Image: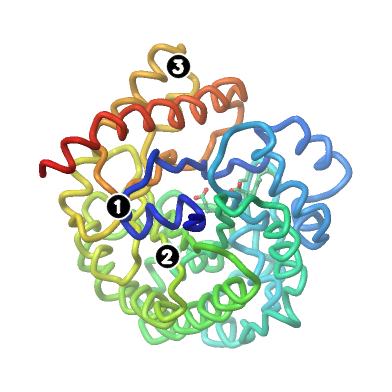
């Protein structure tokens, strides 16, 4: 009996014969075939051409045994659709033409009408879904309001988020108006992706770890809850991911996602027990492990699987995306290793599960 994508089964904490695996930033510069396309087209051009974006989305699945494709776009893509002038600069990241620091700036972000504003994203998803096997998942995604706001306010990547937090503390009404708009934009964007056939969605709050638990609760959490509550009825697994979130995990666990993405700074077993076993987890190998000798990489990957302990509800991933310069052979080796070793661990566990 086909039970749909393995990743969806794991996200629902059903028992699976092996641990599903995919990698953040699996599509992109780690692949020479991507770099060849990038020589003729910018990142934004690729994402706006559905045939090319679909091809780039599928490239990593031809190289490695992966259980999911993640649509090729950027977290800034829907903001372009909502009228924000920006560029994605190689080696830097998103750069905003007119950073947003007042009410007028916030009002310039239009409400997103995905069919009209980002039709190419939805077309890419339809093209990719047709090419995948039923057991493979198509993951849609969006940037979370805080991480989007950090780019919009700073105007470019930042380390300390001084301008972002200054707005938050100094002009809370403007901050809340910005977060409100970004939350609405995220809901419409993800709802449209679900309509176009994605099997799961991931919300990337990459920079939320810059906040204290109190600031998270006051300035961010209401919007995360609104996003997950609004989308919950769609029945699609929702992954809530952030970096340096070890002090925020208990809060994130109450926001309504079905899966929490962990970075490598928290051991997976500890993170999972703090989140609670009623939620699934995704993660959390250090992306730098892919630069280590094969035996070290293998030991670190096995450690992640062992900490998951064969419990239903683990999706294997890195703790953050592939870094530039990651050796492709090691990425392939890792995907193969997770596939084989997790099947072996699940095999061993089965009789124990019956006794338990
Ligand atoms: O497989 C995939 O993950 C590809 C799809 C994807 C991209 N960006 C394409 C991309 C996804 C899921 C993203 C999300 C994204 N974008 C995040 C959240 C995930 C994370 O890493 O925390 C963030 C923070 C961004 C913003 C952004 N875009 C950054 C920081 C950069 C790196 C800039 C650089 O060149 O070092 C980008 C550019 C970007 N987005 C690349 C890719 C493949 C880099 C390669 C290129 O320019 O072609």
Q: Within 8 Å: ligand 1 and the Cβ of disc 2?
A: no
Q: Residue at label 3?
A: 292
Q: Within 8 Å: ligand 1 and the Cβ of disc 1?
A: no
Up/down of 250 relative to 170, above or below = above
Identified at 45% across, 25% down, the residue is 337
Left or right of 203 on screen, residue 342: left
CA gap, disc 2 and disc 1: 17 Å
Left or right of 295 on screen, residue 76: right
Identified at 20% across, 68% down, the residue is 214
Foreground: 210 or 119? 119
Identified at 46% across, 69% down, the residue is 236
Picture quadrant of residue 331: top right
* First of labels 2, 1 by sequence position: 2
Quarter containing the C terminus: top left
Q: Residue at label 2?
A: 238
Q: Residues within 10 Å of mark 2 (few under 14, many from 20)?
A: many
Task: Give the SS element for disc 2.
Answer: strand
Mark carried by residue 245: 1
Q: Position of residue 139 (x, y in %)?
A: 55, 58
Q: Position of residue 257 (x, y in %)?
A: 35, 67
Identified at 76% across, 68% down, the residue is 123
Mark carried by residue 155: none
* First of labels 3, 2 by sequence position: 2
Foreground: 221 or 189? 189
Picture quadrant of residue 252: bottom left
* First of labels 3, 1 by sequence position: 1
Q: Position of residue 329 (x, y in %)?
A: 60, 20
Picture quadrant of residue 87: bottom right
For the question of whether residue 39 can be seen, the reply is yes
């Amino acid at each position: 009996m086909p039970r749909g994508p393995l990743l969806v089964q794991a996200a629902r904490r059903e028992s699976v014969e092996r641990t599903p695996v995919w990698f953040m930033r699996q599509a992109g510069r780690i692949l020479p075939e991507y770099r060849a396309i990038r020589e003729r087209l910018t990142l934004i051009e690729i994402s706006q051409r559905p045939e090319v974006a679909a091809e780039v989305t599928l490239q990593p699945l031809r190289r490695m045994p992966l259980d999911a494709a993640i649509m090729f776009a950027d977290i800034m893509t829907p903001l372009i659709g909502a009228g924000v002038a920006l560029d994605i600069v190689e080696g830097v990241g998103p750069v905003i033409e007119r950073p947003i620091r007042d009410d007028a700036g916030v009002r310039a972000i239009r409400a997103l009408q995905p069919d009209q504003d980002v039709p190419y994203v939805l077309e890419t998803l339809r093209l990719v879904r047709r090419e995948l096997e039923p057991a493979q998942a198509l993951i849609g995604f969006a940037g979370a309001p805080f991480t989007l706001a950090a780019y919009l306010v700073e105007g470019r990547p930042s380390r300390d988020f001084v301008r972002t937090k200054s707005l938050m503390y100094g002009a809370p009404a403007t901050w809340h108006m910005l977060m409100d708009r970004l939350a609405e934009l995220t809901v419409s964007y993800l709802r449209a992706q679900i309509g176009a056939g994605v099997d799961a969605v991931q919300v990337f709050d990459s920079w939320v770890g810059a906040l204290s638990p109190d600031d998270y609760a006051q300035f961010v959490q209401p919007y995360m809850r609104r996003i997950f509550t609004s989308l919950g009825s769609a029945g699609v697994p929702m992954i809530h991911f952030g970096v340096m979130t070890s002090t925020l995990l208990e809060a994130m666990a109450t926001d309504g996602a079905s899966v929490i993405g962990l970075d490598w700074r928290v051991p997976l077993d500890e993170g999972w027990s703090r989140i609670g076993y009623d939620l699934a987890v995704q993660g959390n190998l250090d992306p730098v492990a892919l630069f280590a000798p094969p035996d070290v990489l293998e030991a670190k990957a096995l450690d992640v699987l062992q900490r998951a302990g064969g419990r239903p509800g683990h999706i294997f991933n890195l703790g953050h995306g592939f870094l530039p310069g990651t050796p492709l052979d090691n990425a392939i080796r890792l995907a193969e290793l997770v596939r084989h070793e997790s099947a072996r661990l699940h095999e061993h566990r089965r009789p124990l599960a019956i006794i338990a």
